[in-house]
Amino acid sequence: MYVIVIGGGKVGYFLSRDLLERGEEVTLVEKDPARAQWLESQLGSIVMTGDGDEMAFLKTTGIDRADAVLAVTGDDEDNLVALQLAKREFNVPLTIARVNNPANVEIFKALGVDEAVSATEILLNALETKVIREEIRS
């Protein structure tokens, strides 16, 4: 499986590292040259320096053969634009977004993103599940 990860922060770094360890083909896109250089020192030549929400740059990543694109930057708008381009212009079968503002989850889905993941929602659900379990035990 060929996966493009857009955003080389902590989430993008660990995600790319784990995908590589599982034997997947990965390209990690990071727009900050200094961060990209550090990522390359850790992960090897899978890192490309550029803006993941620019169509001309995305063409250079081999996106036309990607099985999935995951946008995990800290900016919801950048993630949405990148994934809309992946889906609409390059027909990528699977698009997954990290959504920082939980209010944006439904917007992402309505605009064609296959999966929108909010860490805030996941943590709240885990908390609620734990509280419910504790109340049942009491």
Image (tube, rainbow, N blue to C red):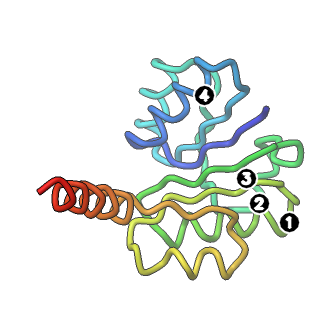
Q: Which residue is mark 4?
A: 19
Q: Which residue is mark 2?
A: 86
Q: Residue 89: x and y, percent?
A: 86, 66
Q: Residue 48: x and y, percent?
A: 63, 36
Q: Which residue is mark 3?
A: 57
Question: How far, Cα to Cα, is label 1 from label 4?
Answer: 25 Å
Whether tag 2 and tag 3 are in contact, CB under 8 A, the answer is no
Three-letter amino acid code of the residue under disc 3: Phe
In the depicted view, which residue is nearer to us: 45 or 76? 76
Q: Choose top left, top right, bottom left or bottom right for residue 60.
A: top right
Q: Residue 94: x and y, percent?
A: 76, 54
Position of residue 55 in the picture relative to residue 102 (left or right)? right
Neighbours of disc 4 within 10 Å: few (<14), some (14-19), many (20+) = some
Question: How far, Cα to Cα, is label 2 from label 3?
Answer: 12 Å
Three-letter amino acid code of the residue under disc 1: Glu
* Rendered-image quadrant of the N terminus: top right
* Helix, strand or loop at mark 2: helix
Question: How far, Cα to Cα, is label 1 from label 3?
Answer: 13 Å
Q: Which residue is mark 1?
A: 89
Three-letter amino acid code of the residue under disc 4: Leu
* Helix, strand or loop at mark 1: helix
Q: Choose top left, top right, bottom left or bottom right for residue 133.
A: bottom left
* Rendered-image quadrant of the C terminus: bottom left
Q: Choose top left, top right, bottom left or bottom right for residue 109.
A: bottom right
Whether tag 1 and tag 2 are in contact, CB under 8 A, the answer is yes
Residue at x 47%, y 55% (from the top left corner):
73
Q: Residue 34: x and y, percent?
A: 41, 36
Question: How far, Cα to Cα, is label 4 from label 3?
Answer: 22 Å
Q: Nearer the viewer, mark 2 or mark 4?
A: 4
Neighbours of disc 3 within 10 Å: few (<14), some (14-19), many (20+) = some
Mark earlier in primary sequence (1, 4): 4
